[in-house]
Amino acid sequence: MKNLKYKKVEAFVFRLWEREVSGEKISPKETEILEKWKIHVEKDLNETGSKESKERILFALEPYFAQPTAGHHNIGFKKYIYQVAAVILLLLSFGGIFTYYTFFKPDVYIAESVNRKVYLADGSVINLFPGAELMVEKSFPADTRIVGLKGDAIFSVAKSKIHPFIVNADGFSTKVLGTVFKISQSGNDKAVDLYEGKVAVSSDGVPVYFLKPHQKWTNFGVPRTAAVLSISPEKNSGKNVSALLSLSFNDVSLEEVVEVLQKNYQISIKYPKEVSGKKITADFTGGSTDENIDALAFILDLEVKKENNIYILKK
């Protein structure tokens, strides 16, 4: 609508109303602008917003469709009613669209090929990584500050003891009062790295985990799995090394459980193929490698034999 000569869209709609009443034809240029506008706004208008807009329009038009009592002016009166109804429909359609875009449609920030910083109204700063997308409701900041995230981003959240900040990501959420953390999402792999402050991470089917600085929450790419790692720099190389602090599974196949255990404990586990699909629910927090493998064998009703770093589960 940048090419409109009218200062306000209301003026443009009112001009169309004048044309409707007087019978004057709408110019091809104005028709072209209307069509382009319609395509533009309807492309992003979601199903809920469209439904609400239609309901408001029908409700507002209802009084105009009452049957006239009688009289020789019925034809002219009906024509006038239809003209008024058409104008009201046009005004309400534009009004509904503008109301949705102005007051309801979330603001969306996208980092396309480079990082992008987003500054929120509460003072929080989000650094979006390439390909990431941040959704912020028009009501932000409210009593609870809620945003949506697709992709990876680092959050520096403005502190507030009474207004929690929640990031809803793909299948998990992170709740904070004020801190710095990173959210990573790649396929099924989900992770939260905490740099300072404190966060609570929740995901479907697993307990809520509270992270301290230099800790990481991850699901290792396996749904209904959660682990907390301690991240610290190695003395000689300075590279970050991780240590497993807690690990839990909720209704996860044995095959996936074994993959996670082998990767984190640097071991090999052999087991009967017929039990690979068995669902495992277990918390391996606090146990040694031997104790956790013994616990897994107990759940499967199997015996365990150890040969160096190889654990053999058998009947």
Image (cartoon, grey):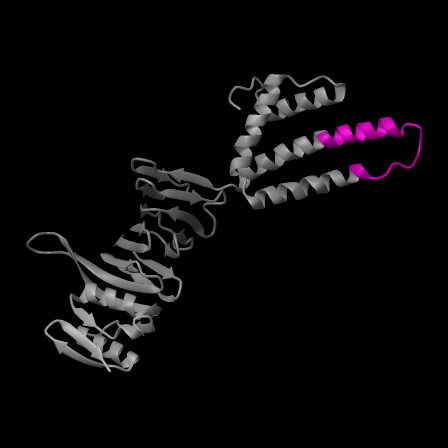
Residue 182 lies, in percent from the top left, at 29, 50
Res 175 seen here: yes
Residue 35 lies, in percent from the top left, at 58, 26
Please name whichever residue, 75 or 230, is drawn nearer the observer in this view of the structure.
75
Task: Check the image and report above or below for 49 versus 78.
Answer: below
Residue 288 lies, in percent from the top left, at 18, 74
Outermost residue toward the right? 71
Residue 94 lies, in percent from the top left, at 62, 32
Residue drawn at (45%, 46%) of the image: 141
Residue drawn at (58%, 19%) of the image: 6
Residue drawn at (71%, 41%) of the image: 58
The image quadrant that residue 201 belongs to is bottom left
Q: Quadrant of the C terminus?
A: bottom left
Task: Check the image and report above or below for 145 versus 243.
Answer: above
Outermost residue toward the front? 274
Q: Is residue 78 magenta?
A: yes
Q: Main secondary structure of the magenta part?
A: helix
Q: Is residue 45 magenta?
A: no
Please name whichever residue, 5 or 188, is drawn nearer the observer in this view of the structure.
188
Task: Check the image and report above or below for 86 versus 131.
Answer: above
Which residues fall within the magenta stretch?
64-86
In this image, 228 relative to 46: left or right?
Answer: left
In this image, 293 relative to 26: left or right?
Answer: left
Number of numbered discs on residues: 0
Res 196 seen here: no
Please name whichever residue, 66 or 275, is drawn nearer the observer in this view of the structure.
275
